[in-house]
Amino acid sequence: MGSPTVAEKYSAEWIREQAQEKGAHWLVSHDCSLCGVDVGWIIDGDYVAYRSGCGCSWSPDRPSSYAEIARSLEIQRSDEVRDQIMADLK
């Protein structure tokens, strides 16, 4: 058996477990290219929402899921980038 695939390594369940272990409520996706404010996911137990509003452009939180976070991690270019995103889980 080879190494796990990206989807297996960064699964929705694994992300949920990491959030619970760290008591995390926020995962940064990226910073706004205009104002630099963090954009990302609000995490509260089973509740997940994507907050795309920032200092220069506001939009309401959008219901999301751990599966969406996993898909977002899956498209990143390397494990180093994925690991850095997860390291910022707060």
Image: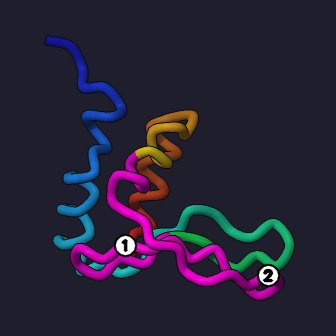
Residue 59, position as x, y percentages in the image: 68, 81
Q: Say which residue label 1 marks.
A: 48
Determine which of the numbered discs, if any, sits on residue 57 in the image. 2
Label 2 – label 1 distance at C-alpha: 21 Å
Q: Residues within 10 Å of mark 2 (few under 14, many from 20)?
A: few
The answer to whether residue 34 is left or right of residue 36 is right
The answer to whether residue 55 is left or right of residue 30 is right
Residue 42 is one of the magenta-drawn residues: yes
The answer to whether residue 30 is left or right of residue 58 is left
Vertical placement of residue 62 versus 14, above or below: below
Residue 50, position as x, y percentages in the image: 51, 71
Q: Amino acid at mark 2?
A: Ser
What residue is shown at x 36% (from left), y 32% (from top)? Answer: 6
Toward which corner of the image does residue 58 lie, by quadrant? bottom right
Vertical placement of residue 20 versus 13, above or below: below
Residue 83 is one of the magenta-drawn residues: no
Residue 62, position as x, y percentages in the image: 52, 73
Q: Residues within 10 Å of mark 1 (few under 14, many from 20)?
A: many
Q: Amino acid at mark 1?
A: Val
Which residue occupies the foreground of this view, 83 or 52?
52
